[in-house]
Amino acid sequence: MSAAVPMGRMAVASPRFKARMAGLFYLLTFLTGGFALIAGRGLVVSGDAAATAAHILASEPSFWLSFAADLLGAVCYIVVTALFYELFKPVNGSLSLLAAFFSLVGCAIGAASGIFRLAPLTVLGGAPYLSVFKADQLQALAFLFLKLHAQAYNISRVFFAFYCLLIGSLTFRSTFLPRALGVLMVFGGLGWLTFLSPPLAKSLYPYILFPGILGEGALTVWFLVMGVNVQRWAEQASAAELWRS
């Protein structure tokens, strides 16, 4: 009897623990993303390949730190995705799996775009085999790689838009989280969805970041502070299990 009680408590506490961990890793995603933006600020000069190349070479440590922060952020978001899948599976297993798919594809594209981000360091590195190119050609090529990185990163944001929309829907349909959080997540997803049209997203930047920060930020804070309603989560999980059987 005494052994059964701790095991029962662990089972009950598990969803709340997962929620708190999801909130923690979501917060780490925000922090690493913010650090990457700060570390990479001012390195790219719009329309000026020569100035951009000069800034990159003069601030190579910042360039590497920005890349590392982005990569760490992607890892944190993968952890969030796995925890969210487990938390929202009782609401709708298929939608939760689809949401995880969109998130993982977005993370993969975002991580792969890092290759384009690092390429300018190789191009501008002064290796002997690059001597066949003129300096302005190398600067233009480095600038091109940075443009490709930005475009790939924007594509990843579209996948995250669908992820936020699905998580918002699951949150709204859940019984263990406030529906307002679901509405805010859908609002955030609609904001990220504007990256389907790069000119539109560019014209609205940086204001278009606000819906995503609001929606995802609210969910992060809620998970960190409140977690989930464990009793209602267990009831919904039991109902889902009965329905499947």
Image (cartoon, helix red, strand yellow):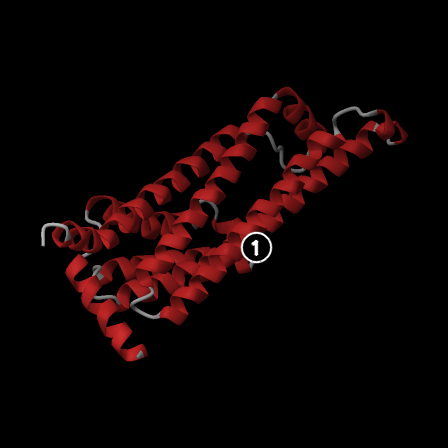
Which residue lies at the image location 79% right of the left edge and 24% below the top edge?
A: 126
Judging by the rendered image, the residue that carries numbered circle 1 is 155
Q: Residue furthest top?
A: 58
How far from the left and from the top, in percent, is residue 69? 49, 34
Question: In screen coordinates, is 105 left or right of 45?
Answer: left
Q: Residue furthest left?
A: 1
Residue 101 in the image, given as x and y percentages of width and height: 49, 61
Residue 12 drawn above or below residue 35: below
Q: Is residue 126 left or right of residue 148?
A: right
Left or right for 82, reference 5: right
Q: Quadrant of the N terminus?
A: bottom left
Q: Amino acid at mark 1?
A: Ile
Viewer can see residue 41: no
- Label 1 Cα neighbours within 10 Å, binned few <14 / some 14-19 / many ≥20: many
**Residue extending furthest right?**
132
Establish if 71 lies above or below 125.
below
| Residue 128 appears anywhere in the view | yes
